[in-house]
Structures are given as C-alpha cells and as structure tokens.
Image (cartoon, helix red, strand yellow):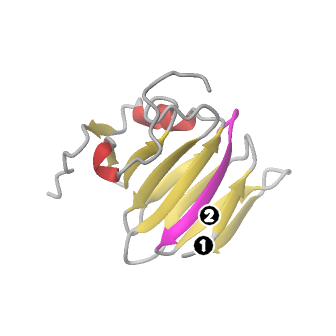
Amino acid sequence: MKTTLATRSVMNPNDAETIVAHWVTAKIMASPRTTGAENMSAVSLYFNPGQGHARHNHPASEQLIFVIGGEGVMMIEDEAGRPVETAIGPGSLVTIPRGAFHSTFNTGWEPLRILAVYSPAGPEEAMRNSAEFVVLPPGEQPNKA
C-alpha cells in the first residue's frame, strides 16, 4: 500500500471541513487529501429546499449518488444530449457515466441529503477550490443567518 497521507479508515463529519454555498452544505468525507484514498472520493451534501446545482459534467470521473433523505429531481443527459429527469428519494442510487451532463434539484421541504462518490477522485477538489464556496475548518459551524 502506497503511503501518501495518514490513512484514515473512519472519517467523522466533525473531522472534515465544511464547504458552504447558499444552495448547499458539503463535507468531503474521503479523498486523496483527506483520507489517503487513491482511486475514489466521497462527499456528503445537503441541498437546501428549492435549491440545486446547475448542469455540469465530470469529464474524467464516473459518479454514484446515493439519496439518504429528502426528495429531488436528477437530470442526466442521454447520448443525444437530451435531458432525462427522474424523481429521486431515500434509497435511490444514481449512476452518472464519465462526462455525462447532469444536475440535481431539491423539490421537497427538507434538505435533500446525498452521498456522492467519484471515481477517480478529483471533482471534490474542484468544489473545494471554487470561489462560489466558503471552506470552514473542521468543527466550525456555518452561519445560519
């Protein structure tokens, strides 16, 4: 096993940075930087009611999205570039092929809670480094004002 960082087998949310935008709160739970995972990453996301992310893709990564709670709509473009929308809720597992354009939107009254897994890792760092997000150190709570 290659030694890169201190390898973590268990990552608790309070040990992870909190990444915040007006529409989402996220925690990178596994990545090469946070846990030493080499081939994948995982991000816990809470989408605020009535919010979501714009259409985008991950040219180098496949993505799995597991819905923990809440309700939403997942859009994934088909091979012809046509948007295909599907309702998602607790227990739904979405597979997004490498490079497929997609978006996620919370249609419910409570947070849409998902776990996003990327293989290979990389998209989580793009979120972390985007000017759209504020990165808070582990243990610091986002302002609710």
Residue occupying the far left of the picture? 145
Q: Residues within 10 Å of mark 1 (few under 14, many from 20)?
A: many
What kind of element bears circle 1? strand
The residue drawn where x is 53% and y is 50% is: 54
Picture quadrant of residue 15:
top left
Residue underneath mark 2: 74
Residue flagged by tag 1: what amino acid is it?
Answer: Ile
Q: Is residue 34 magenta?
A: no
Left or right of residue 48, residue 107 in this image = right
Q: Is residue 56 visible?
A: no
Residue occupying the far front of the picture? 1
Q: Is residue 12 visible?
A: yes
Say above or below: 143 vs 19. Answer: below
Highlighted range, magenta? 56-69
Residue flagged by tag 2: what amino acid is it?
Answer: Met
First in sequence: mark 2 or mark 1? Answer: 2
Q: Which mark is residue 88?
A: 1
Q: Which mark is residue 5?
A: none
Say above or below: 46 vs 136. Answer: below
* Position of residue 37 measured from the top left corner of the image (x, y, whole percent): 55, 35
Q: Quadrant of the C terminus?
A: bottom left
* Position of residue 114 measured from the top left corner of the image (x, y, whole percent): 50, 61
Confirm or deny contact between disc 2 and disc 1 (CB under 8 A).
Answer: yes
The residue drawn where x is 70% and y is 33% is: 60
